[in-house]
Image: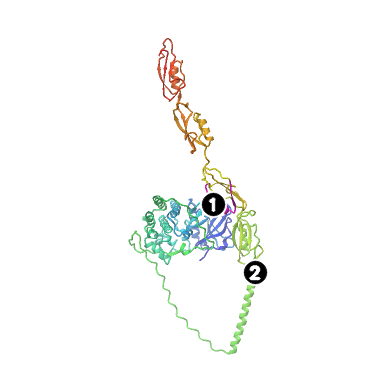
Amino acid sequence: MTRTQPSLVGTLLERRYRVDRLLARGGMSAVYRGLDTRLDRAVAIKIMDPRFADDRSFVDRFVREARSAAQLHHPNVVAVHDQGFDTPMGQDTGLAFLVMELVDGGTLRDLLAEQRQLDVPLALSVAEPVLAALAAAHAAGLVHRDVKPENVLIGRSGPLTGGVVKVGDFGLVRAVASAGTTSSSVILGTVAYLAPEQVATGDTTARSDVYSAGILLYEMLTGALPYTGDTALSVAYRHVNDDVPRPSELRPDLPPALDELILRATRRDPEQRPADAGEFLAELQAVRAELGLQPVAVPVPPPPDEDRVADVERTMPNIPAVQQTMPVSGPRGTRAMTRAPMPPTPPPAQPPAAAPEAPKPRDRRKVIALIVAGVLVLGGLIGAFAYILTDSGPTTTTVPKLAGLTQAEAGDQLRAAKLNPRYSEEFSNSVAANKVIKVDPAAGTKLDQDATVSVVVSKGRPKVPDIRVGASLADATKAIQEQQLKVAQGTPEYSDTAPEGTVVRVSPAAGTPVNVGGQVTVVLSKGPEPLPPVPDVTGRPKAEAFQLLQQAGFQPEDGGEEFSQTVPAGAVTRTDPPANSTGSKKIKVYVSNAVQVPDVRFKQFDEAAQILRTAGLDVDRKGGGGHGGFNFVMQQDPQPGSLVPKGTKVKIRGFGD
């Protein structure tokens, strides 16, 4: 099987994308960790197998599918940044490649290898973002066609948070299917997850992705696949002819509602499945709500070893297309399929050729002479061959001086010296990022050609990690020490946002470069600051009361108006909580709406009545008829200066009334 060449490590594609460490290798492509040198951004580079390079139909389809995938903008979809086609220096053929978002972590396959079977809350917490990603694709008119654990990536969303689930490789299967290296009589896909219609006709719709996602959920919950067989073809036939068994047969504690949903998603008749991933997601969320299950953090599996190569027969098998026979009714309205034709019987073996006749006896001296001549000729040939070998050039080479070069430059130098680089990274206080610190063996060492040289590349000075407010001291310590920095504890501070004993802040701030072994101070929370007793602001004007409460650290709120016989209008009658109490930061302030009765004695009746009404009081008038020429108020009740509610009736009387 042809595989992407390891010598690509260290080269630049299109003078921009540097190919670094190999992350994964499959039957169609290899994925490398790389660097976008223009944006100084870590990326993942998927390089297709060189056998596709000369196939124009594949390249055209590859470009179209890459552009379609790049239109998907969703937090659970692996972003496609760029696509290209380049012939790197030293390569005979061009390479098609995708530049994608780098997901720092592993795959769902790695998580299943660790845990084998996921508990229900964790399985749903993985399935929901997978379906969300597929729903976004289906809404955009795209179908994935190859939903499987290898295409579900789980990466770190931050130094101290759980994993983020992302789906990748949208449209890649359709691009490969267009290549001349495949035949129209084969089905490309992962046989364990193929929908029946993909096997029978090659047709794929959103409901096909729903079927594959259902099988994925089945595997997460049971730790096994519903169908197994000795060959990929036998598994494909079972997808077409058998109903997916209940997952509860392998896991009896599975909730019945979830059991039924998986069966519905994996029905052989596409029309009986949810219409698309969005509908499947809505039903799954309804089941989770019915069960009262909350989402949980998804653990991030470690990335695979560098040398691990995917099992192509498991991840991307080619199986003969299954021919259909006449329709046969089944439990779910699907059609039975014929078995694949048997391979042709090999032609009968040809009878053995007659044995050659034995040579006739020769003269003894002639035989000896022939033997001697043969020995001389053979000796001459051996000598000539040895001369050719010794004259073909040196078999050793010298490690070049690489210190201070960029990683790409070092790779070029080593390949020119017929040596293979193996890169690693270290922090350095003195060597800039992406520059070579040292090599092993050292420069000037004589090595055999094709030997491997370890190249240590600088990551620059470490930076203070971004630690969220409220993180535990243990998590903060781990994140800081991973940057080869030391932890010191600062003086604890009060905080309204960080629980007691958790991180309030770090110093220096996140992202600050620090020397290797430098110190980062972690300040922990003492919890909310204790509040003083509520000040007594009774009788003070409202504005003044609010100011005094705010200065004491409280949050005053308007409680409304109320009557008080002792507090004048506009002044505070009381607070809630009351003065001198503790325990609450928010304080309601109530203000008096009492009216102070104005003094209208010795004023003419009409003027007195107007003054009282302006103050918000009613008037009970008697007199003012001019007895003896007197038209003045002589008496009033309530008395002047009294505090009364608004609308109180004030009696005014004249002389003699």
What range is drawn magenta here? Answer: 469-490
Q: Nearer the viewer, residue 37 or 158?
A: 158
* Residue at the right extreme, as displayed: 444
Q: Nearer the viewer, residue 254 or 591?
A: 591
Identify the mark at residue 179; answer none if there is no mark: none
Q: Is residue 622 above or below residue 160?
A: above
Q: Nearer the viewer, mark 1 or mark 2?
A: 1
Residue sitting at x 60%, y 87% = 368
* Residue at the top extreme, as displayed: 628
* Residue at the left extreme, as displayed: 329
* Residue at the front extreme, as displayed: 580
Q: Is residue 387 above or below residue 417?
A: below
Whether residue 316 appears in this view of the structure is no
Q: As drawn, is 397 to the left or to the right of 528? A: right
Q: Secondary structure at mark 2?
A: loop
Q: Nearer the viewer, residue 612 or 552?
A: 552
Decide: few, some or many residues near mark 2? Use Cα within 10 Å; few <14, some 14-19, many ≥20: few
Q: Secondary structure at mark 1?
A: helix
Q: As drawn, is 208 to the left or to the right of 157? A: left
Q: Residue 498 in the image: x percent, y percent?
A: 52, 45
Mark 2 highlights which residue?
394
Whether residue 612 appears in this view of the structure is yes
Inspect the image, locate mark 2, and give the three-letter code of the amino acid beneath it.
Answer: Pro
Q: Residue 515 in the image: x percent, y percent?
A: 62, 52
Q: Residue 84 in the image: x percent, y percent?
A: 54, 56
Mark 1 to mark 2: distance in Å?
Answer: 56 Å
Inspect the image, locate mark 1, and give the three-letter code of the amino acid beneath it.
Answer: Ala
Mark 1 highlights which residue?
474
